[in-house]
Image (cartoon, grey):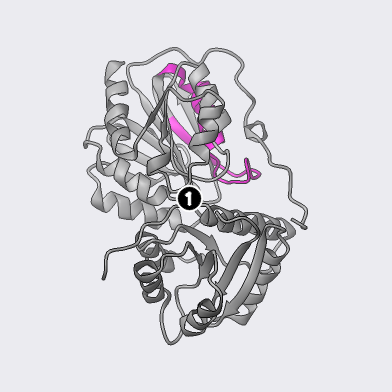
Amino acid sequence: MKEGKIKVLIVDDSALVRQALMDVLSHDPEIEVIGAASDPFHAAARMAEEAPDVITLDIEMPRMDGLTFLKKIMTQHPIPVVICSTLTESGSETTLRAMEYGAVDIITKPKLSTRQFLEESRIRICDAVKAAARSKLKALPQISAMRVEPKLSADAMLPGPTGKAMFGTTEKVVLVGASTGGTEALRVFLESLPRDCPAIAIVQHMPEQFTAAFSKRLDSICRVTVKEAQDNDTMLRGQALIAPGNKHMLLKRSGARYYVEVKDGPLVRRHRPSVDVLFRSGARYAGKNAVGVIMTGMGDDGAEGMREMKEAGAYTIAQDEASCVVFGMPQEAIKLGGVDKVLSLTDIARDVLRACAQG
């Protein structure tokens, strides 16, 4: 990322949304809003005057829809784009298609609500813009001054490790955490797995509503079954459970049965769901029966939890810098000494299967 403030261009046909985003972003000392456009044509004219570092982009707009504009940006002059969308099941499919076209993240449109909602929205929006500014982009082929709430640890959801995990079983479980760039990384990973792979639990930083559509899309292209997790879902071979947006997911165990608990709670490491929460629960309830994978993403969510997993006997893998969109979360986990092996994205699935087969 360039030195100085992150220059952001807001593109949305709603004047209220443009103003809300300007208010949120302009109060962050690391961000400068250089303009707000009501449609892609006005945006293109503003970009000709000054190139932004990041664009926030609505999907449904007059004159030219957001997807068409996104494709033009990514094929002609790639710029990190954060999709600003509404919380609707129908709109989430289109938004996920935007991620395939090269958008780096999804945020939900800010709206007046409770004080907690506004504060959490501000954190999410500013963090998404900062992550986008640090991301690595690939061109598509032709076709604060504001107060930040304390960054809570996983202690907010469950106590730290108190000793050895529960006794071993013959079944392994795989716990995966990802953020910016993770939608594509998870597709590559899950598509590489056989139908009878070990049970998988995934936390991908993503707003509510979008995780259901994301799960369905992956389920349609992968051999394994992929579904949005529900409370008390059993961990099954050949199935990947994705934490629902805006809910924490924990691994639990009853006898030889592993299952997930989906619950509310505060932001942990500035996220809900949090990778740290999932990984800590893996350290506590699975120990050496677990394999942990931390993928592309900005920040340090998952780093402490992965260290706890490794100390509990789990085998841990981090995605390497070359294949990450943002080498933040894996790098922090490596720094803490919580990683057994660093691998390219295309090699992770093979190593996970090898580790699980060794028992």
Residue 261 seen in render: no
Q: Residues within 10 Å of mark 1 (few under 14, many from 20)?
A: many
Q: Quadrant of residue 158?
A: top right
- Tell me, yes or no, whether the highlighted magenta stretch contains residue 116: no
Quadrant, the N terminus: bottom right
* Quadrant of the image containing the C terminus: top left
Q: Nearer the viewer, residue 234 or 208?
A: 208
Q: Position of residue 222 (x, y in %)?
A: 25, 46
Residue shown at the point (38%, 67%) measured from the top left: 74
* Vertical side of 27 occupied by 280: above or below: above
Q: Is residue 282 left or right of residue 141?
A: right
Regarding residue 55, the answer to whether it shows in the image is yes
Q: How many marks?
A: 1
Name the residue that disc number 1 marks: 180
Q: Position of residue 31 (x, y in %)?
A: 66, 61
Figure check: 181 above or below 359: below
Instruction: Provide the residue span drawn in magenta.
Output: 259-288
Q: Write the residue at 71% across / 55% down.
A: 116
Amino acid beneath label 1: Thr
